[in-house]
Image (cartoon, rainbow, N blue to C red):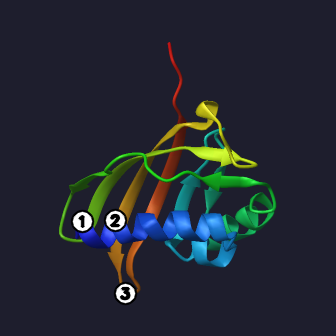
Amino acid sequence: MSTEIVRLLTRMAETWNAGDAAGYAGLFTEDADYITFFGLHMKGRQAIEESHRELFKLPIKLDSGGGQPLIRPLSDDVALVISGGSSSVDGEHDPGRESVITLTALRTSEGWRFASFQNTRVSRP
């Protein structure tokens, strides 16, 4: 389970950095819930693809790293995933863009997919 989910996270970064909106959205279930760091809630693979098609026109890339994700199996077919994330704009790392991402991974007939995504900016109190 963990290896397959780590591969899914890797594909998420690869499709993001390639600007592949269809490939990125394909990592999610048809009815996925996707919540951005500023609170926009998108419902479904099509909405994820459409919004990311526009987003990928910007010079935002995901940085590598973020440490090992926490993968907590909830059943044989469901896992909670918590991962760090950060991004760069025009090749410059921006510490203000560091995030904690919480996902629900679900084993489907297509293989493992994300059924939910929540991106929260890291802030200092």
Q: Residue at x 65, y 71 (%)?
A: 18
- Please report contact status of discs 1 and 2: CB closer than 8 Å, yes or no: yes
From the image, state whether disc 3 or disc 2 is nearer to you. Answer: 2
**Helix, strand or loop status at disc 1:** helix
Given the image, on which type of amino acid does mark 1 rest?
Answer: Ser
Residue 2 disc label:
1
**Helix, strand or loop status at disc 3:** loop
From the image, state whether disc 1 or disc 3 is nearer to you. Answer: 1
Identify whether 122 is placed above or below 66.
Answer: above
* Residue 114 in view (yes/no): no
- Please report contact status of discs 3 and 2: CB closer than 8 Å, yes or no: no
Give the mark nearest the N terminus, 3 or 2.
2
Which residue in the rendered view is the most extreme toward the top? 125
Q: Which residue is mark 3?
A: 109
Q: CA distance from mark 1 to mark 2?
A: 6 Å
Percent x, y of residue 14? 55, 69
Q: Residue at x 53, y 58 (%)?
A: 33
Percent x, y of residue 115? 44, 64
Give the mark nearest the N terminus, 1 or 3.
1
Q: Residues within 10 Å of mark 3 (few under 14, many from 20)?
A: few
Q: 51 and 63: which one is in front?
A: 63
